[in-house]
Image (cartoon, rainbow, N blue to C red):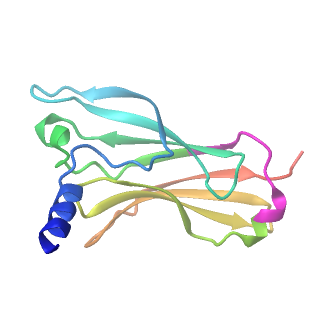
Amino acid sequence: MRRAIAALMLSLIFLPGPLTAAWADEIGSVGYRFKWIGPNDKIVIDAFDDPDVPGVTCYIARARTGGVKGALGLAEDPAQASISCRQTGTIDQSRLGKLRNGDEVFSERASLIFKTTQVVRFWDAKRRTLVYLSYTDRIIEGSPQNSISVVPVGLN
């Protein structure tokens, strides 16, 4: 039994490629640095819907390291990310007061184990605005680089 659990844990750690949440869709990518061996370094754009606020979609762009390490899922991606969120449908405003500030709405690993790019949501009730913050954290030392996007709610 212990061997099966250990094998499962090792397979999860050494899975190639990024582990993106199942609900994120890759919109596209562009190469920005040529690599002689393996895929080029690129900037990837993903779209995801806020799981707790139907009617809001966020687009996040971030660098993905290529080369041999990138192809094997061993590379560490840069900490920069950009985010833009928009209302794409009807928002149920009665649910907004029940949201917890700082809830994670998206997460993707940016290195083999220790680094993660995340998006968290805040509800600014006074201004009736959803605020989405993207940042990268690391077990030892994170990065202060961040990006925000706001979605006004119920303003005509």
Horizontally, is 15 left or right of 152 in the view?
left
Q: Position of residue 95 (x, y in %)?
A: 78, 64
Give the vertical position of 56 relative to 141 (above or below).
Answer: above
Res 58 seen here: yes
In the image, what residue occupies the spot 29% across and 61% down? 115
Q: Is residue 10 or residue 145 the one in the foreground?
A: 10
Quarter containing the C terminus: top right
Q: Position of residue 50 (x, y in %)?
A: 61, 52
Q: How many numbered callouts?
A: 0
Q: Is residue 58 or residue 148 the one in the foreground?
A: 58
Horizontally, is 34 left or right of 81 in the view?
left
Image quadrant where residue 9 sits: bottom left
Q: Magenta includes 85?
A: yes
Res 112 seen here: no
Image quadrant where residue 137 sits: bottom left
In the image, what residue occupies the spot 28% across and 70% down? 141
Give the vertical position of 98 relative to 91 (above or below).
Answer: below
Image quadrant where residue 123 sits: bottom right
Horizontally, is 76 left or right of 62 in the view?
left
Give the vertical position of 33 relative to 60 (above or below).
Answer: above
Q: Position of residue 128 (x, y in %)?
A: 80, 61
Q: Is residue 16 or residue 109 the one in the foreground?
A: 16
In the image, what residue occupies the spot 39% across and 42% down? 62
Horizontally, is 151 left or right of 28 in the view?
right
Q: Position of residue 64 (x, y in %)?
A: 30, 40
Quarter containing the N terminus: bottom left
The magenta span reads: 84-95
